[in-house]
Amino acid sequence: MTRPRVFVARRLPDAGLAPIAAECDVDVWPDRLPPPADELRKRVAGCVGLVSLLTDKVDAALLAAAPTLKVVSNFAVGVNNVDLPAATVRKIPVGNTPGVLTDATADIAVTLLLAAARRLGENSTDAKEGRWITWEPTGWLGCDLVGRTVGIVGMGRIGFATAKRLHHGWGMKVLYTARSPKPDVDRELGAKHVDFDTLLAESDFVSVHADLNPTTTGMFGAEQFRQMKRTAVFVNTARGPHVDQPELAAALRAGTIFAAGLDVTDPEPLPPSHELFTLPNCIIAPHVASATTGTRDAMARLCAANLLAGVRGERLPHCVNPQVYE
Ligand code: GLV
C-alpha cells in the first residue's frame, strides 16, 4: 500500500519526525534556511500533508498548487504565516501547537523584562568592552520591579502565565486588555481589565501577548509610546508587526520610554545594522521564546499529532479553523 506523502519544511526534533516517518512517506527540507516559495510549491504539490514553520508562507497560491493537500500542521502557536480563509475555503484544517510553549514563552517575557529593566544588554557589553572601570554609585541604574504595575496586552494563556510570574514573584499589580474581562484571572491575580489607553498610561511594564491580525498590526506607534510612562519598559514576545519599529526606535532614542526587550521583530532576522541594535536601551533576542529542548520536543509531538490526524481524515487535536468540520 502506498504511504501518504508529506512535506516537512525543516528538520524537526525526532520526537515529531519519528511518528510522522512511521506512517508517511516524508520529504524533509534539509537546509537551515526555509525553502524558497517556488521550491515549497513544487515540494508540496502531490502531498497530502504539510508541516510548515512560521517562516513559511502558506498562501492561497501554494494551496492552489497542492490540490491533494488534506492538512497543514504549523510548528508554532501563531498562524499568521497561513492564509486561514484560503485554507478554510479548501476545507483544509490547519493545526497549531498551543499550550506546550506557554511556560517557555512567559519565561522569556520575564527574562527580557528584567534584562531591559536592569540594562543587562548595555552593562554586560560595557563590561566586556572595558568600560567597567570601578563600582559606581550612580552607574547603570535600572528600575525596580517589586510592587510595580504590569500591563498585559492580550490576556490569553501566555499573557496569564507572564502575569502570574510577575504577580506572585514580584507582587506586581496586573492590568490587562482582552476582548472581555476574565473573572478567573481577576480572582487569581487581583487583576483588572482596562482599556488600552488606561493600560498604557498606568503600567510600569507593558508586555505584548496579542495575536497578530489586522486590528493588532501596528498597535504600538508614536502615540502609544507617548502615552506610556517615561520610565516604562516595553516587552514584545508576540509578533514584530504589532509594533511600528521606527517609532519604537525614536521613542527609545528620545527617552519617551525607558527601555525595550524584544523577542520578535519585523523583519526577522533583523539586519545586524538595524538601528534598534545600536540603542543601548533595547535588548533583542532572536525569536527564541519556545527554544528549550523540552518545549520544542512537545511542539514537535503536537505538530505530528495534528499532521497525522489530518492525513488519516480525523479531527486535528488543535485546529485553528474548526469551520472546516461544519
Ligand atoms: C512562535 O512564535 C510561535 O508562534 O510558536
Image: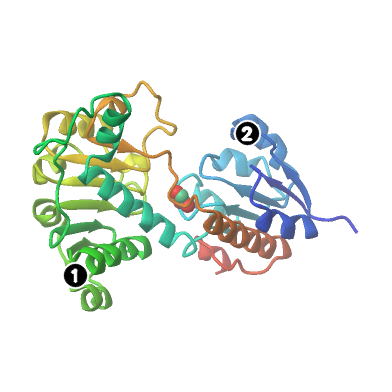
Query: Does the Cβ of the disc 2 residue fall within 8 Å of ligand 1?
Result: no
Q: Residue at x 55, y 59 (%)?
A: 294
Quadrant for the C terminus, please.
Answer: bottom right
Secondary structure state at the residue bearing disc 1: loop
Residue type at mark 2 is Pro
Tell which tag, 1 or 2, sits nearer the viewer: 1
Which residue occupies the extreme front position in the image?
A: 134
In space, the residues marked 1 and 2 are separated at their CA atoms by: 44 Å
Pointer 2: what residue?
Answer: 35
* Left or right of 167, for residue 35: right
Where, quadrant-wise, is the N terminus in this rendering?
A: bottom right
Task: Please tell me which of labels 1 and 2 falls first in the chain.
Answer: 2
The 10 Å Cα crowd at callout 2, few under 14, some 14 to 19, many 20 or more, is some
Residue 170 figure quarter? bottom left
The answer to which of 100 and 280 lies nearer the viewer is 280
Residue 102 point in image, percent of width and height: 42, 61
Q: Where's residue 297, x and y in %? A: 59, 57
Is label 1 in contact with label 2 (beta carbons under 8 Å)? Answer: no
Q: Is residue 158 above or below residue 326?
A: above
Q: What label does residue 191 carry, if any?
A: 1
Q: Residue drawn 61% across and 44% down?
A: 63
Dot 1, how many residues are within 10 Å of its Cα: few (below 14), some (14-19), or many (20+)?
many
